[in-house]
Image (cartoon, helix red, strand yellow):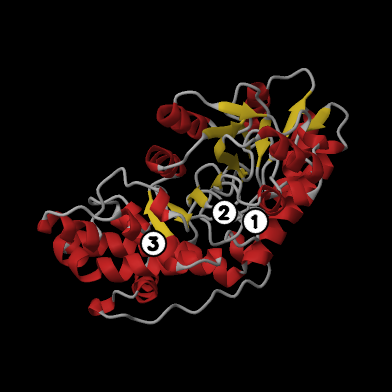
């Protein structure tokens, strides 16, 4: 992280509410007079078109300032800073996350990543019946389920992602489960193809037939939907599209009684139960009990509040629209190139920010390498079937998208 000025540090201390140990006032909302002002919040090097920054986020200014402010406080007095501010700052994070998600703060547990969250959920979940996933989920989902259940049945939601429809996906889900299905694992936005699942329609078709657990990491910060009613459990890292601190994530649920803690929590109730020599009743389990205890990278965890607050000030709907506009521009531009096949659906209702494509005659890895020579940062989908992957976020603009299209044309 670049060195912060004294003015930035003072502003950051006020924003995170730790000046002289008092609550402080929130910093005024930025004035996004156009998306250029938003892009300027991210310190990405200007000589590269960063269309892969969603893999591991760059932090906007508010988040960087908050991280540095907390780090300085911890370095100066580690025990005192934690003792004085932990409860207040943990609450600020869960409150900010809840406002953004449209849920209750008491239903938000904190983790370090999507992978940790999936491991905690699937290792501790109580279900009767079979666990079912899809062929399109990432390794972390499949492996976490395998470690817990052993055998894992997978269903296929589409053959050609570019031609998938809401109706065909919903029908594939309906026909893929039966009365023996106790748990269905879905991924909201597929990082393998860019397909965004119609979760509202899927949830309505299931009518509570099984527990629905969703990996939402590539939707969080890119899709404008409240999660309540879409699933029973949502797991997401917050260091991708949201621009949150690296090494942060969350679990949201209203089914805490069906989740057994895997890592001891430092919440009050389980700790008091241990002191008193009595087990904690499952009926009292909540998000705090499911949040792993221990000492964390506190400066990053606590700066997560600024990531959610920044996105909330920008407007979840406006951010989603901006990402959708850039992704559509990219898909349409790539689709005009004769040797390019766009894998991701063109419809905004079935896509978000990820855009996957193939270039005839070239391996995905070769395309990414050659794009890097043109200062276009891209990635290869980390699956058995590889595609080139670009993802315009709020740290990008039309010039980045157009530069990528020109570079692919030159291939």
Q: Is residue 374 visible?
A: no
Mark 2 crowd level (few <14, some 14–19, many ≥20, 10 Å Cα): many
Residue at mark 2: 220
In the shown orientation, is residue 142 left or right of residue 256?
A: right
Element type where label 3 sits in the image: helix
Residue 55 versus residue 218: which sits nearer the camera? 218
Number of the label disc, if any, that sits on residue 383: none
Q: Mark 2: which secondary structure?
A: loop
Label 3 and label 1: CA atoms lie apart by 22 Å
Q: Position of residue 280 (x, y in %)?
A: 24, 55
Q: Position of residue 382 (x, y in %)?
A: 57, 28
In this rendering, which labeled residue sits more in front, label 3 or label 2? 2
- In primary-sequence order, the first of circles 3 and 1 is 1
Instruction: Check the image and report above or below for 27 versus 291.
Output: below
* Residue under label 1: 223
Badge 1: few (under 14), some or many (20 or more) residues near its Cα, within 10 Å?
many
Report x, y in % for residue 165.
81, 42
Q: Work out which residue is located at the far top of the displayed protein and give it.
A: 361
Residue at the disc numbered 3: 303
Label 1 sits on a secondary structure element that is loop
Q: Depth-wise, is mark 3 or mark 1 nearer the camera?
A: 1
């Amino acid at each position: 992280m670049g060195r912060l000025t004294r003015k930035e540090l003072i502003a950051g201390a006020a924003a995170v509410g730790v000046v002289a140990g008092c609550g402080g006032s929130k910093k005024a909302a930025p004035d996004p007079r156009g998306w250029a002002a938003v892009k300027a919040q991210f310190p990405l090097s200007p000589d590269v078109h960063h269309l892969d920054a969603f893999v591991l986020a760059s932090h906007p200014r508010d988040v960087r300032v908050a991280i540095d402010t907390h780090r300085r406080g911890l370095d100066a007095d580690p025990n005192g800073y934690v003792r004085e501010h932990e409860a207040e700052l943990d609450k600020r994070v869960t409150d900010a996350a809840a406002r953004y998600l449209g849920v209750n703060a008491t239903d938000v547990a904190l983790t370090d990543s999507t992978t940790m969250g999936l491991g905690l959920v699937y290792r501790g979940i109580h279900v009767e019946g079979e666990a079912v996933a899809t062929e399109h989920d990432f390794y972390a989902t499949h492996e976490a389920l395998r470690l817990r259940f052993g055998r894992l049945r997978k269903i296929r939601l589409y053959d050609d992602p570019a031609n998938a429809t809401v109706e065909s996906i919903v029908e594939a889900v309906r026909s893929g489960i039966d009365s023996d299905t106790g748990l269905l694992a879905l991924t909201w936005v597929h990082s393998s193809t860019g397909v965004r699942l119609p979760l509202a329609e899927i949830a309505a078709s299931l009518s509570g037939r099984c527990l629905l657990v969703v990996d939402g990491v590539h939707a969080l910060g890119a899709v404008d939907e409240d999660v309540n009613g879409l699933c029973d459990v949502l797991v997401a890292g917050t260091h991708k599209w949201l621009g949150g601190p690296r090494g942060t994530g969350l679990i949201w649920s209203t089914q805490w009684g069906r989740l057994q803690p895997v890592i001891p929590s430092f919440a009050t109730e389980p700790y008091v139960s241990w002191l008193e020599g009595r087990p904690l009743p499952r009926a009292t389990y909540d998000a705090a009990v499911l949040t792993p205890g221990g000492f964390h990278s506190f400066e990053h965890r606590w700066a997560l509040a600024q990531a959610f607050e920044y996105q909330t000030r920008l407007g979840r709907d406006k951010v989603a629209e901006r990402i959708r506009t850039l992704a559509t521009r990219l898909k349409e531009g790539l689709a005009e190139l004769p040797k390019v096949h766009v894998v991701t659906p063109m419809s905004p209702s079935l896509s978000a920010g990820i855009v996957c494509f193939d270039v005839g005659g070239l391996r995905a890895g070769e395309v990414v390498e050659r794009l890097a020579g043109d200062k276009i940062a891209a990635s290869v989908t980390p699956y058995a079937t590889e595609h080139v992957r670009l993802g315009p976020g709020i740290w990008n603009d039309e010039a980045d998208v157009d530069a990528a299209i020109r570079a692919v044309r030159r291939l």
